[in-house]
Image (spheres, helix red, strand yellow):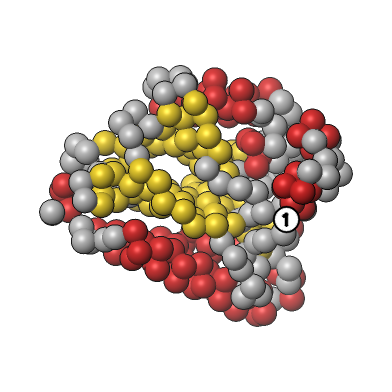
């Protein structure tokens, strides 16, 4: 199999400040076979630096995705090595500047490849940025939030309706902070024709419910789908930065592209 035979993402995306924040702490990566969203934290400067470091460090792995012999195991190794590299880099930069102490970032990344003729995606996830899949008429959240709220939901301590207004809804249990203690979510999924994927920061998922997200993703044109979702977040007050990446897949040969979003630009 040559590189020209590998599948590609067809993508539209936007990263915006929102209606309350003064800067964009989100970063994103668009590539033919790798998409990612990082949502920084630790104050205006710290959040921007942490999310940008995550995206720029992850992008260094892109050369390996041109290898047509990749397997699920090698993708997992690549992702886990990248996570280690990102965490080390964030820790190194934070130690050099006291004002950056405590900075960190979420990361959700989706890699596309082919295994035995089957298009496949691998999802790497830390924090509360999210990945969704729209398959036919069914929306599925592929990622699972690393938050205190999610742990309470898993234990049955609160109901989904109570979660909407819970005071700890944004408290993370995992993030990339240079501390070396991580248990990332990493899973592999088959891709069916017409599957559509969404990567987003919680500036979108924290404002829109699943019905609203599904309505936006169902808009056929990718650019229009992104515009619908971003506009809906603004209509809901957009209290945080909003980063939206909507992607279809294709087996048609596309020129390899790479683009950074938000703070990583």
- Which percent across, then down, holds residue 263? 56, 52
Relative height, residue 122 to residue 142 (above, below): below
Which residue is located at x 40 percent, y 68 percent? 77
Q: Quadrant of the N terminus?
A: bottom left
| Residue 235 location, quadrant | top right
Q: Residue furthest front?
A: 156
- Which percent across, then down, holds residue 105? 63, 59
- Which percent across, then down, holds residue 197? 44, 36
- Which percent across, then down, holds residue 36? 47, 50
Which residue is located at x 26 percent, y 61 percent? 70
- Badge 1 crowding class, 10 Å Cα cut-off, few under 14, some 14 to 19, many 20 or more, is some
Count of residue discs: 1
Which residue is located at x 15 percent, y 48 percent? 4
- Can residue 31 be seen at all in this image of the molecule? no
Relative height, residue 18 to residue 170 (above, below): above
Q: Is residue 57 left or right of residue 51?
A: left
Taking depth in this image into account, of 52 and 23 the one nearest to the observer is 52
| Residue 18 location, quadrant | top right
Q: Residue furthest right?
A: 167
Taking depth in this image into account, of 205 and 232 the one nearest to the observer is 205
| Residue 22 location, quadrant | top right
- Can residue 232 be seen at all in this image of the molecule? yes
SS for dot 1: loop
Q: Is residue 166 left or right of residue 209?
A: right
The residue identified by callout 1 is: 172
Taking depth in this image into account, of 52 and 173 the one nearest to the observer is 173
Which residue is located at x 51 percent, y 67 percent? 83
Q: Is residue 141 left or right of residue 44?
A: left
């Amino acid at each position: 199999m040559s590189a020209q035979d590998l599948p590609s993402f067809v993508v539209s995306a936007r990263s915006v400040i929102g209606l309350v924040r003064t800067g964009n702490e989100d970063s994103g990566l668009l590539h033919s076979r790798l998409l990612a969203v990082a949502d920084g934290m630790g104050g205006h400067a710290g959040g921007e630096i942490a999310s940008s470091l995550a995206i720029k460090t992850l992008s260094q792995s892109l050369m390996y995705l041109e290898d047509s012999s990749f397997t699920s195991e090698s993708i997992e190794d690549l992702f886990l090595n990248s996570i280690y590299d990102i965490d080390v880099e964030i820790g190194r930069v934070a130690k050099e500047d006291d004002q950056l102490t405590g900075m960190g970032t979420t990361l959700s990344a989706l890699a596309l490849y082919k295994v035995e003729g089957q298009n496949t995606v691998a999802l790497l996830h830390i924090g509360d940025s999210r990945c969704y899949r729209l398959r036919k008429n069914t929306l599925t959240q592929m990622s699972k939030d690393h938050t205190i709220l999610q742990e309470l939901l898993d234990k049955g301590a609160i109901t989904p309706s109570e979660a909407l207004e819970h005071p700890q809804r944004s408290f993370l249990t995992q993030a990339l902070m240079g501390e070396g203690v991580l248990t990332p979510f990493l899973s592999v999924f088959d891709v069916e024709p017409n599957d559509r994927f969404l990567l987003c920061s919680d500036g979108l998922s924290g404002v829109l419910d699943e019905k609203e997200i599904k309505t936006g993703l169902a808009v056929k044109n990718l650019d229009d789908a992104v515009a619908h979702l971003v506009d809906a977040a603004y209509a809901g007050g957009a209290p945080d930065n909003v980063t939206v990446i909507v992607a279809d897949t294709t087996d048609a040969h596309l020129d390899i592209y790479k683009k950074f979003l938000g703070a990583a630009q």
